[in-house]
Image (spheres, coloured by chain):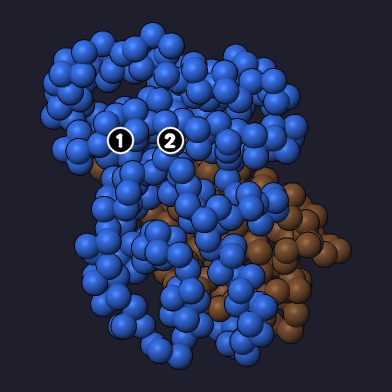
Amino acid sequence: MRPPPEREALQHLFAEYRRSGDASVRDRLVEAHLGLAEYLARRFDRRGEPLDDLVQVASLALIKAVERFDPDRGLEFSTFAVPTIVGELKRHFRDKSWAVRVPRRLQELHLRLGTVVAELTHELGRSPTIPEIADRLDASTEDVLEAMEAGRAYRSSSLDAPVAAEEGDATMPLSSKMGEVDLNLSNVDERSQLASLLRDLPERERTILVLRFFDGLTQSQIADRVGISQMHVSRLLARTLQQLREKAIAAGEPPPELR
Amino acid sequence: MSSEEVRLAVPALPEYVRLARLTAAGLASRLGFSFDEVEDLRIAVDELCYLLVGPDGREGSITLTYAMEGDSLVIVGHGAAGPRAAEFADLSEQILAAIVDEYEVTRADDVITFRMVRHQQRQ
């Protein structure tokens, strides 16, 4: 594997990208590390998935890693990027049953959707409309809607087995905000199902739920705050909600009267 | 104020709830809702259809009506209560309260009717 160009030059590029959000700077950073993505993709070769697909997954994960990398946190980029890319490659294999059901073009669109939505949100300073996304993806609005549908962990599709920690996410910067989260929970009726269910959740899932449904942040805002992609927030939300529902049912709590 | 309506009747099975979500998304897109708002609507529709369908589905069908009224999307659904309907818990209420502007769920005998409204935010 060809070693990447001088560290210092790259550090400057990362600092510049973080400051300006300039896509051409990002692209240079991605190019500089494509060898790494390909190398990791090859590690997963000959497991039943075409190498081309793996390289694409790895490359998209690399783009995500470049976008999310914070040079001020003292990590080497490759230390940060490798778990991100490997995590996406593993997820690609876990989603294989999804791969059988969902047409390939939609899968590709779905993979690109996250990046494009993040880009547009950054550029526009707001959540993009569906036609704006379709334009950027060079697809129809129907395709975009189908692509949004393709990736969600809804009740009607089988969920990924819960993973203890998703590889590749930046370390949660919210540990310092845990005090805030606890404060919110203490306002909830102690006897409510919701409070007790929330308490049993892993920290990240609980935080996302609280931010979404108590603080009213949008998924994009949560993604920004927590340091993961909006698509990931979306998946985590859907999956966590279903798990909470199942727990509530299993706990056999007496149901409230419907209004 | 213009008003257009779409009506959808599907078997009360989980795989068809997808169509309910997709229809909501498509109409919201027509009204100019943003990506975040469309995602919210899909969660809301999914949540409410679950009441009528349950995790494994049941016999019969559910009916949804989507009305575009000016800038707003009004979704009304009804059907026989699904096997999980009694467990419309705090969590579902919290979720819906956060992501739609108005909602209402009523039950008469074994039939559930829900109604939800989302206004498009001008940005």
Q: Chain A is shown in which shade?
A: blue
Q: CA distance from mark 2 to mark 1?
A: 10 Å
- CB of mark 2 within 8 Å of CB of mark 1? yes
Q: Position of residue A160 (x, y in %)?
A: 63, 49
- The residue sitting at 45% across, 65% down in the picture is A202
- Position of A209 with respect to B62 (left or right) is left
Which residue in the protein does label 2 denote?
A84
Q: Position of residue A247 (x, y in %)?
A: 61, 74
Can residue B121 be seen at all in this image of the molecule? no
Vertical side of B91 occupied by A67: above or below: above
Q: Quadrant of the C terminus of chain B?
A: top left
Letter of the chain in brown: B
Q: Looking at the picture, which amino acid does disc 1 mark?
A: Arg
Which residue in the protein does label 1 denote?
A68
For disc 1, the chain is: A
Q: Residues within 10 Å of mark 2 (few under 14, many from 20)?
A: many
Q: Looking at the picture, which amino acid does disc 2 mark?
A: Thr
- Which residue is more in the foreground, A131 or A152? A152
> Under tag 2, what secondary structure?
helix
> Under tag 1, what secondary structure?
helix
Q: Which mark is residue A250?
A: none
Badges 2 and 1, same chain: yes
Q: How many marks?
A: 2
Q: Position of residue A205 (x, y in %)?
A: 44, 60
Image depth: mark 2 or mark 1 in front: 2
| Mark positioned earlier in the residue sequence (2 or 1) | 1
- The residue sitting at 31% across, 57% down in the picture is A217
Vertical side of A162 occupied by A131: above or below: above
Q: Position of residue A179 (x, y in %)?
A: 24, 72
- The residue sitting at 40% across, 64% down in the picture is A203
